[in-house]
Image: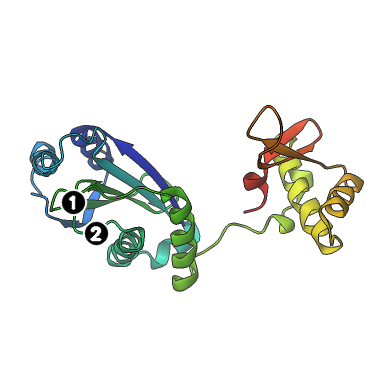
């Protein structure tokens, strides 16, 4: 389960997108007149006027699941998960529609909601990307949803170029962590396996560390691309 967050200024454009796919189906909603796209957009726009200074009142979240979970994901179950996700993200007391798509192998739905709450206040987006990761992880665990494939079980000989380097780095990191009790030893263990670990800095003075980067065979990856 993965959540992708966006904000926008046009309810009409967002609604046309989520309802325009083949077999798109509204599986849950609240506070919205479910008629034509124009009527739904107008419902959102009316509430938007309660706080007209907000330039991007459109909240749009895509929740995507693994193909392995498709047999379990009835419309009702997907709606239940999406509603619980919204509750945990603090998206409450506002208008929304949840639209299911069938145009990819990954079961997924789109949540379109009004960032302007029913009483006119703005739904906070503070740390929303971090909270999104925490919430999706919690829901995966709660409902036993499929996690990503274990990279250590992948036959890297069948992969090429960047993808092969990425999997080899993942396996090297996994092995290096077993015998490392310090940062320097971790770097040394990676080096033995042909992987260079670099720090990424926020500033030119190189005083504030922003993250890490792994390099192998001319390819470079952020730490978040490897350790997931």
Image position of 65 (left or right of 188): left
Give the residue at x 79% y 30%: 218
Residue drawn at (55%, 61%) of the image: 147
Report x, y in % for residue 227: 66, 52
Q: Secondary structure at mark 1?
A: loop
Q: Which residue is mark 1?
A: 117
Mark 1 vs 2: CB contact within 8 A: yes
Q: Is 93 rendered above or below residue 188?
A: below
Q: Nearer the viewer, residue 135 or 143?
A: 135
- For disc 1, the neighbor class at 10 Å (few under 14, some 14 to 19, many from 20) is many
Residue at screen point 9% across, 44% down: 43
| 156 sits to left or right of 91 | right
The tag earlier along the polypeptide, 1 or 2, is: 2
Is 196 situated left or right of 84 in this image? Answer: right
Q: Quadrant of the C terminus?
A: bottom right
Image spot of residue 25 (x, y percent): 23, 51
Label 2, residues with CA under 10 Å away: few <14, some 14-19, many ≥20: some
Counting from the top left corner in percent of width and height, residue 196 is at 82, 40
Residue 5: x and y in percent read: 39, 44
108 or 133: nearer the eye?
133
Q: Which mark is residue 37?
A: none
Marks 1 and 2, how far apart at CA: 8 Å
- Residue 191 left/right relative to 85: right
The residue at the far right in this view is: 192
Q: Residue furthest top?
A: 204
- Which numbered dot is residue 92? 2
| Relative to 212, residue 183 above or below | below
């Amino acid at each position: 389960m993965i959540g992708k967050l966006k904000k926008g200024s046009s309810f009409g454009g967002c609604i046309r997108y989520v309802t325009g796919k083949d077999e798109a189906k509204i599986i849950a909603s609240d506070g919205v007149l479910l008629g034509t796209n124009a009527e739904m957009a107008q419902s959102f726009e009316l509430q938007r006027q309660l706080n007209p200074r907000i330039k991007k009142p459109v909240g749009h979240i895509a929740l995507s699941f693994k193909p392995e979970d498709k047999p379990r994901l009835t419309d009702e179950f997907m709606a239940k998960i999406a509603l619980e996700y919204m509750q945990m993200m603090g998206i409450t007391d506002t208008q929304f529609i949840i639209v299911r798509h069938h145009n990819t192998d990954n079961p997924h739905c789109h949540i379109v909601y009004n960032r302007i709450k029913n009483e006119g206040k703005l739904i906070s987006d503070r740390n929303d990307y971090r909270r999104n990761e925490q919430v999706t992880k919690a829901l995966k665990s709660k409902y036993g949803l499929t996690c990503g494939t274990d990279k250590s079980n992948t036959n890297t000989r069948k992969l090429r170029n960047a993808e092969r380097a990425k999997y080899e780095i993942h396996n090297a990191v996994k092995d290096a962590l077993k015998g490392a009790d310090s940062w320097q030893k971790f770097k040394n263990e990676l080096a033995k396996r042909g992987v260079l670990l670099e720090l990424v800095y926020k500033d030119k003075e190189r005083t504030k560390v922003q993250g890490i980067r792994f390099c192998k065979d001319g390819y470079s990856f952020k730490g978040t691309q490897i350790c997931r």
